[in-house]
Image: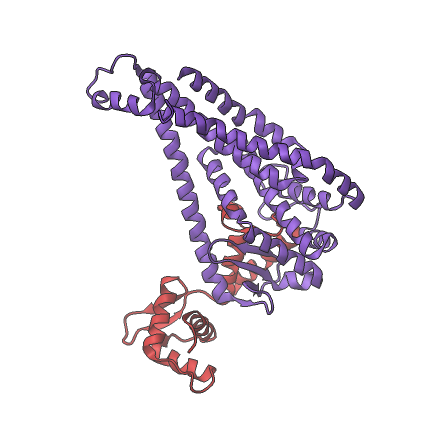
Amino acid sequence: MASLGELERSVMEVLWTTDADLSANELRDALALRDEPGRSVATTTVLTVLSRLERKGFVTRTREVRPHRYRALLSREEHTAELMHEVLDRTTDRDAALARFVGTATAGEAATLRRLLDELARS
Amino acid sequence: MLAVSAVLGALAVALAWPVPVALSRAAWPTRAPAAALALWQAIALAGGLSMIGCLLAFGSAPAGSLPAAVAALAPHLFTGPLPAGFGVAQVAALTLAAAVALLLMLNLALTAVRAERERRRQHQLIDLLSDPLPGEPRTRVLAHPVPLAYCVPGIRTATVLTDGLIEALEHDELAAVIAHERTHLDQLHHLVRLAFRAWHSAIPWFPIANRAERAVITLTEMLADDGARRAVGTDALRRALERVGDAGESGAYPESSSGANPDAAMLDARLRRLGVDPSVAERRERDIRSVRAAALAASVALVMVPVVALIAILGIVP
């Protein structure tokens, strides 16, 4: 039985690679296809994982239809950009929360980061 | 009581201005970072306690002790008149002491909560976005081309490296980076950084608070560097710092408002102490022993003065 953390990752990978909104049942089937046979998870477990991911701001759901349909709030690249931004940002209390190997952001680092953010904004 | 107040006031002024300025200009802290870090903490703690103690001693002088002063003032504080010996100055001093203590404690709590919230978000993102690095516990790899290494301290810890960093560094350089971050985590550097961050944010207009925080961050980086040297060697660490830090290049993200880049200066100081010739370093190591002992003794003495005074103010010692 996979841990909740591993399941969260698996659910996000499915949602990140799917364009359509998915129901919990469809997600369960997609997970069963990804993993080895015999490791299938129950729909209730998928729902638990989805509500955890929703609380953390990774997943959003459509409530108009039943059953509710879920999709990723942001792409994987956007979340990575968010993480990098939090680590590199000088305006927060970062020094109290994290410790970087080298505090200063180098010119190359800044240029690469700016280019990636631009690409993300265009797509 | 007034003599106690005067002594604590003088100590508070000394620890607020000339002492930290002298320490931040001294050369020995880069050679004895642990002792210097202890001294910085003693200065901050003793400075805060002295300031609060000075006000408490002055305000409670007419009654002889703080509990006696509170007992005398409490029934009359809102109805007046004030009991004999007490004036507006005494009441103001006691109120100010309570306000300063409250401000410092609230700021510490607030900073801790904010840091904890940021760490929780970091863990959430790291869990979903990164993969474990085989063979290194609690070390994760993030798919991103910018070369970056950092650690998330706390009860649950993580060291994060990017693809870009792993690509840019040799194997031993990467080991030095990991050992550096692990030293931060093992020595709980985040706690002392948190305290100085909170102190700085409580009095952001006070230039010494900024200077003290920079000094403390630099010293923790040097201690982490020393951990990496012990684990992997000076040479690998120096190469890693030069490669990642692009030494001498000014930080461009985001543009710093002031002209000088404090991060670049810190990197410079870290690299300089790694470049010292081993034989010179050994001779200096002998010289530094007495400095280190003196710094530790001064740290203990500094904290003892206001603590003993506060015990007297509280009337525990007759």
Number of marks: 0
Judge by depth and name the residue closer to the eye, B113 or B225.
B225
Tell me if residue B228 comes above or below residue B267 in the rendering. Answer: below
Q: Position of residue B129 (x, y in %)?
A: 51, 66
Seen as rendered, the residue at the extreme left is B79
Chain coloured red: which letter? A
Report whether residue A104 is seen. no
Q: Is residue B27 left or right of residue B71?
A: right
- Position of A30 compared to B145: left or right? left
Q: Which residue appears at 49% of the width and 36% of the height?
A: B200
Q: Residue at x 62, y 53 (%)?
A: B180
Residue placed most toward the observer, A44 or B227: B227
Residue B139 percent across, percent down from the top left: 56, 63
Seen in the image, is B95 located left or right of residue B27? left
One can see residue B95 in this view: yes
Q: Tell me if residue B12 comes above or below residue A93 in the rendering.
A: above
* Residue B4: % across, % down: 43, 19
Quadrant location of residue B99?
top left
Q: Give the colour of chain B.
A: purple
Q: Report the residue at 49% width, 49% height from top.
A: A97
Q: Quadrant of the N terminus of chain B?
A: top left
Quarter of the image for residue B21 reads top right
Q: Residue at x 41, y 76 (%)?
A: A20
Write down the quadrant of residue A63 in the picture. Answer: bottom left
